[in-house]
Image: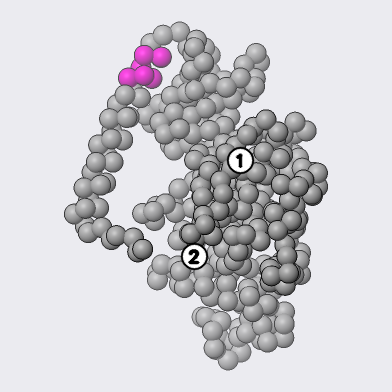
């Protein structure tokens, strides 16, 4: 069934109601902050945001006797939007609470547009993005390539992870091998694991140690199962595939940071079925296709669209097999999805 389209008045009314609710929540939060700051707060120190709950966040202490302890913290009104992985300056209270007073600079941030097209960070200080896919739901090269473009744009190294390898069978093996072959030829790091059976999990742990990683991918690819396998006892909720659509159901509702016993951290983000790239330009998309790097700028025409133009270096490479048809189709599909001003 098609989604019901909202008219302008209905959209305005929804935004107005949401704005009023947000204002009331902010006012309550402001009073809570004033009450805390009027009491006996501890000295300023650094902390790490490990989860976000609307107007409050969970902060893990990083200093002295509070190192490793978790506090539910309020945010001062003048702070920018915080996300999981942010390093902050905060003051602890007396009852497991506290107040965040400043955000420290980010080394990196992973962003995506929200439903209204506004750019929204989803994780901070990440140095590895783990792109998870599986035999079921059926993986799509275009979605994987969107994540690769986003990783390149953010300056975050990618790791491709095929989960549920135990579900590979005669029906999907040929298509999967063709898909994986393209990324192996491009020398992207690629692992095949089964969180259910445990195959390949030790190798995955080694790839995650020493890094701040974020798991992204369609709902239903087993991200929560992977977290449970990597961190026994965490017990994140696991959802089944929808019998109606064959797609995954969302089980993670907020981005949360976990620590590995051997070092390194993992941010488990909500399932994302489509990863919009409305915040990137045509040049950013081309930079995200690493096999294009040596070819860009070599076309006969400076404004070449790499479509049908004579003397196009990309089309020549496509004909010679140096660019795979799957990747060129993905590139064109992503470009077509950009706002017209950026195309």
Above or below: residue 305 compared with residue 222: below
Q: Which residue lies most toward the top here? A: 40
Counting from the top left corner in percent of width and height, residue 46 is at 58, 24
Q: How many marks?
A: 2
Is disc 1 placed on a helix, strand or loop?
strand
Residue 136, quarter of the rendered image:
bottom right
Question: Which mark is nearer the camera, 1 or 2?
Answer: 1
Q: Is residue 86 in view?
A: no
Quadrant (top left/top right/bottom left/bottom right) for the C terminus:
bottom left
Residue 168, above or below 254: below
Q: Nearer the viewer, residue 282 or 31?
A: 31
Q: Which sits in the foreground, 86 or 258?
A: 258
Q: Residue 156 location in percent, x, y?
A: 64, 51
Q: Quadrant of residue 4?
A: bottom left
* In front of the other: 303 or 127: 127
Considering only vertical position in the picture, is 52 above or below 330?
Answer: above
- In primary-sequence order, the first of circles 1 and 2 is 1
Task: Report the magenta stretch's main SS.
Answer: helix
Q: Is residue 169 rendered to the left or right of residue 301?
A: right
Q: What residue is drawn where x is 67% and y is 44%?
A: 226
Residue 96 located within the stretch drawn in magenta: no
The residue that mark 1 highlights is: 267
In the rendered image, residue 70, in percent from the top left (x then y), is placed at 57, 22
Q: Pinpoint residue 34: horizontal percent, then vertical percent.
A: 35, 17
Which region shows up in magenta? 31-36
**Residue corresponding to mark 2:** 281
Q: Is residue 336 left or right of residue 221?
A: left
């Amino acid at each position: 069934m098609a989604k019901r389209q909202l008219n302008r008045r209905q959209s305005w009314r929804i935004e107005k109601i949401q704005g009023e609710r947000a204002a009331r929540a902010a006012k309550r939060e402001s009073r809570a902050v004033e009450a805390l700051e009027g009491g006996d707060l501890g000295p300023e120190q650094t902390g790490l945001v490990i989860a976000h709950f609307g107007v409050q966040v969970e902060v893990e202490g990083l200093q002295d006797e509070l190192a490793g302890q978790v506090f539910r913290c309020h945010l001062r009104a003048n702070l920018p939007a915080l996300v999981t992985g942010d390093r902050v300056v905060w003051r602890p209270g007396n009852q497991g609470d506290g107040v965040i007073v400043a955000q420290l600079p980010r080394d990196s941030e992973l962003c995506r547009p929200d439903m209204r097209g506004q750019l929204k960070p989803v994780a901070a200080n990440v140095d590895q993005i783990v792109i998870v896919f599986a035999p079921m739901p059926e993986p799509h090269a275009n979605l994987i390539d969107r994540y690769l473009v986003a990783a390149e744009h953010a300056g975050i190294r990618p790791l491709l992870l095929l989960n549920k390898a135990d579900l590979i069978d005669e029906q999907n093996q040929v298509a999967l091998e063709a898909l994986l072959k393209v990324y192996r030829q491009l020398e992207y790091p690629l692992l095949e694991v089964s969180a259910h059976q445990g195959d390949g999990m030790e190798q995955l742990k080694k790839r995650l140690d020493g890094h701040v990683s974020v798991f992204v991918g369609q709902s239903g690819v087993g991200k929560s199962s992977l977290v449970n396998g990597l961190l026994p006892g965490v017990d994140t909720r696991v959802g089944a595939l929808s019998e109606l659509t064959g797609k995954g159901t969302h089980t993670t509702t907020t981005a949360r940071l976990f620590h590995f016993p051997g070092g390194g951290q993992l941010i488990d983000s909500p399932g994302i079925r489509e990863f919009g790239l409305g915040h990137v330009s045509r040049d950013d998309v081309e930079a995200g296709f690493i096999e294009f790097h040596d070819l860009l700028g070599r076309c006969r025409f400076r404004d070449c669209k790499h479509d049908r133009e004579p003397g196009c270096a990309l089309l020549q490479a496509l004909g010679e097999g140096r660019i795979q048809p799957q990747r060129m189709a993905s590139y064109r599909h992503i470009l077509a999805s950009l706002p017209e001003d950026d195309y």
